[in-house]
Image (cartoon, grey):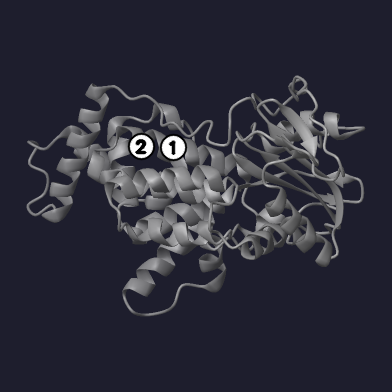
Amino acid sequence: MTTVLRASGSSEFLRIVPSLAGFTPRRSLVLLPFRGTRTYGAMRIDLPDDGVSLEEYADAAVGLVARVEKTDALAVVVYTDVEAYSTRDGLVLPYTVEIDEVLGCAADSGLRIVDALCVMPSGWASYLDDEPVLRDLEEGAPPVPGLGDVSGDQLAGTDLPAADLAEKERVARALRDLDELLAHGRIGGVTGRENPQAIAALTLLEDLPAFFESVLTTPSDLPPFAHAALLWCLNRPIFRDVALTQWATDLPGGVRTLDAQLAFSGGHVAVPDDLGDVFLGRGPAPDPARLRRALDTVRESAARAPRLSRPAPLTVAAWISWALGRASHAGHYLDLARAIEPEYGLASLLDTMIGAAVLPEWAFRRGA
């Protein structure tokens, strides 16, 4: 179902931006691509730092908007903690030079400018006015059914779930014992002296695609041995990539990816392009609800993981967030992962993609 939000002017437009974005931005530039008189969502990027090339910044911002199908116009909204200041020539808005560069780049790209607004602690004003006037901020729009609370900023919802110390210890012990079982190749079979949770986790690994599917059912109620098994898999790239691809496609996609990964590791054949494209954000768009369940699952596991095992689920959470179009959330999870292991491979790759403002191709598609 499509929800239609209507605004008759800049003031009403500002009230609905949080609903379009899914949060209330802070210290951000929000880009809203239009087709005719309609916009279908919002994109957020950080405000430019001192010393950044304004030309490159504007090119990147407008390039994001231009990738959205059938876009012919653009609105921008700056959210800043910096106040405007008065001169003898009138009110000077923060980031005026930067927004002039963005609007000029948009015009050069053939995009019509719908609006350009600046939201400050004391009020808002328009960059398009020859003599900007500070206006009072109005209360936000009423909640939109199905969108939930949008009062938090762009990092709202990134805190890991709470996990008590006893549960963390059970997961750590099951993971440690599972490692030992697998490292010794189960020589001589199970003796009965092993940790029962490690044995249970070992059983789950006998059919990885089925296991990756099962953890999506009740992410918040997984037993410790299931978290241990998942952490073991996510810490091994060959199986981590199976999980990512399966969660972004379906169970048969996971089976194909596992077969392809095993064949590739054996030096036989390359991974099929359509499977590799999933990681790069190409191909059919994943089911957002399925990805959100996967994100819930890896966040729960990250919350219970021993510290040195945490970069893997955090980085997987970053990829899933990126696949959902939440680059800000992805960046937060990458920061957490790099704080533990600065050179973690997948985190470095994702950081490069996000830093270059690369988003999945499916994030730019919309219906006619």
What residue is rendered at 40% in x and 26% in y?
Answer: 221
**Nearest the camera: 4 or 73?**
73
Q: Which residue is mark 1?
A: 297
Q: Where's residue 190, x and y in %?
A: 11, 44
Amino acid tagged 1: Thr
The answer to whether residue 109 is seen in the rendering is: no
> Any mark on residue 70, and which?
none
Around disc 2, counting alpha carbons within 10 Å, would you say few (fewer than 14), some (14 to 19), or many (20 or more)? many
Q: Residue furthest front?
A: 88
**Nearest the camera: 49 or 309?**
49
Contact? badges 2 and 1 (CB < 8 Å):
yes
SS class of the residue under badge 2? helix
Amino acid tagged 2: Ser
Q: Which residue is mark 2?
A: 301
What residue is rendered at 44% in x and 32% in y?
Answer: 219
Quadrant of the rendering where the N terminus is positioned: top right
What residue is rendered at 24% in x and 38% in y?
Answer: 306
Q: Residue furthest bottom?
A: 268
Around disc 1, counting alpha carbons within 10 Å, would you say few (fewer than 14), some (14 to 19), or many (20 or more)? many
**Nearest the camera: 115 or 279?**
115
